[in-house]
Amino acid sequence: MEDRERMSRLVSLLRRRGLVLPSFEIYGGVSGLVDYGPVGASIKRRVVDAWIGHWGSITNVVEIDSPTITPEPVLVASGHVGEFNDKMSECISCGGAFRSDHLVAEFHEAPDTLSSSELDDLIEREGVRCPSCDAFDWKKPMPMNLMFQTSIGAMGGSRTAFLRPETAQGMFMLFPALYRHFRQKLPFGAMQTGRGYRNEISPRQGMIRLREFNMAELEYFIDPDDPPIDDLSKWPDRVCMIPDPDGPHPGEFEMSFKEAFESGIVKHPTVAWFLAMTMEFLEFVGIDRAKVRFRQHAGSEMAHYASDCWDCELMGEHGWVEVVGIANRTCHDLESHEEHSKSSLLRAWRTYEKPVKEKSEVIKPVGSVIGPTFRERAGEVSSALSKLQATPSTFPFELELPDGTIVHIGEDMVNIAVEDSIVSGEYFTPHVIEPAFGIDRIIWHILDHNYMEVDKEGEGYTILSLKPEIAPFDLVVLPLFDKDGMDKMARDILTRINSLRGIIAEIDTSRSIGRRYARADEIGIPWAVTIDHQSLEDNTVTVRRRDDQRQVRTDLDGLIGGLKSGSLSSMF
RNA sequence: GCGCCUGUAGUGAAGGGGUUAUCACAAGAGGUUUCCAACCUCUUGUCCCGGGUUCGAAUCCCGGCGGGCGCACCA
């Protein structure tokens, strides 16, 4: 499956032509950081724009943009501070590294709550041996923080913060604003693209595991009792699905999304819809469908926030790589933020089909009696009374306060009222379906799947067969010779084309025409326009199609029209 | 983070304790050519960084940084 030679030729091309390069190279480089060069940045922008356009086509999905610097409490609530702060023990004898809490798991009920020194004591006391070499020779447990920490503000007044490990929290923070924006109606979604940061222990595999990377995430907020259901028959083609091997459908299947949902392999209708939408996006940007599979997480590898999770994996020179995670995060995030922040704005309202009439007895503390009787504790007594579920039948009765104190409540201290109310609905915490895309990983696979090494008249020849929608340039303008008026005409045409909104063209005037076609093919420019002697006489040019090198002659208006409407290929 | 391998123009490679480090491709200037990496002339540009050994280090040694693979870790 892997061809190291092909991969190294591809990587050389990416560096040589300014697509993707190591960052800070003149200072020795930094592992896990890459630059998109002049060609790569253009591709990346178009892939991101395509992603925004794709999901934005769902009504009720909007784009937002949040800070990357995130205060600590947000990430405590999300679970990242706990999850991303594992302590690691290193074996001096063999160099192996292991999670300290796993080493002492059989000696403690909640090993993940222990501090470094407590873990160290326990390892010493129990004589825990190295799982790989059986030695008893440990370094002290070290916290392994996978988030980049910083502080907001200077000196004493500063607050701890982290660079975000995912963009998703930005959408949760804006839930109240989104709920208002969407006139308090579910479902709705918010998406953002941007950088995420993880201080990986050992970044590997080029742009597959980065320390700073581009993500694109969508949080789709739904009513769990009324999940959106889309018509899956729009996507009849089959795709490789690998359900949870520990579940009821172990194995590997070729099936449509509709079949996967109807057979119960994909449980949630909205998740099934998003799987299909994900496949559609990947094909739009030029991913080879035959190199795609959807794999359901086993329970044991589920992220801390998810209840069901599907990975979309792509096959490339690095093997199968996870590029999209589609998770049902349920109400985990909103509930946790409600608990930690004490905000009451993280819920949605659900109106009942028929209002419910409720008759209830309510206990109302009488402040004028309770106040003088209990003095400074009157507040606690009042709130304890209000929380009583059942109305007491006899007086006086004993009431227990939160700290265990027992007080005696007389009949004169409360009013018991019977209230009739009409309840027309209820508040609930929305559930969230999240597709999370690793943009860099997708770009790598776009390049991989479209990197064509072909034979051209006995010579090796390279074509990057990118979809026109994500090509770095829409076309290249080539004067056959850089003189005799062809030079001026080419520059005039270039100016005219570049004035079209959203169209990017470049010009190449150096060396032979064949060499210039080759250069353009190598970075995936789909169209080349050549100005020759005839152009000067009749205002026509030739248009060359990258993938089959065929040419047609057209007049300038035909060229401009075809470019604007994206229909150049209809000329062939 | 550990182990093994590795680092020479933009890319790919050769070489190597001693004068000015070699080659191909690429790139720039000019010429030639009426459409697919042709050809001619000229030009630019390289030993990852630091320390050590040595009269002398790009070469040997050590460390760092970067890359590949394996282990470990990882939404």
Image (cartoon, helix red, strand yellow):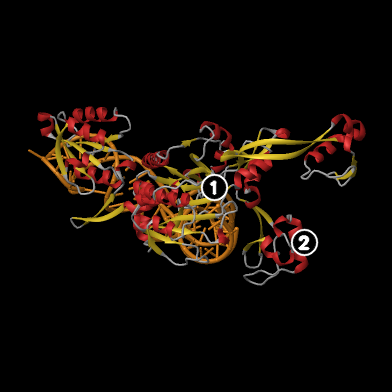
- Is disc 1 surrounded by few (<14), some (14 to 19) or many (20+) residues within 10 Å? few
Residue nearest the observer in this picture, A459 or A289: A289
Identify the residue at image location x=56%, y=57%.
A302
Q: On screen, A180 above or below A35?
A: above
Q: Which mark is residue A195?
A: none
Chain to which the residue tagged by mark 2 belongs: A
x and y percentages locating residue A225 in the rendered image: 54, 47
Q: Nearer the viewer, residue A349 or A551?
A: A349
- Location of residue A128 by image quarter: bottom right
Between tags 2 and 1, which lies in front? 1
Q: Amino acid at mark 1?
A: Asp
Q: Give the secondary structure at mark 2.
A: helix
Answer left or right for A31 relative to A364.
left
Q: To which quarter of the image does residue B68 belong? A: bottom left
C-alpha distance separating marks 2 and 1: 49 Å
Label whose residue precedes the other's in the sequence (2 or 1): 2
Same subunit, labels 2 and 1: the answer reads yes
Instruction: Name the subunit of mark 1.
Output: A
The one nearer the camera, A97 or A175, is A175
In the rendering, at what x and y percent does residue A237 appear?
33, 55
Disc 2 residue type (three-letter) = Asp
* Res. A161 image quadrant: top right
The residue sitting at the right extreme is: A373
Q: Are marks 2 and 1 in contact (CB under 8 Å)?
A: no
Q: Residue at x 71, y 60 (%)?
A: A111
What residue lies at 47% left-to-right and 55% top-to-bottom? Answer: A311
Which mark, by number, is residue A225?
1
Secondary-structure class at tag 1: loop
Q: Relative to residue A107, is residue A32 depicted above or below? A: above
Badge number at residue A121: 2
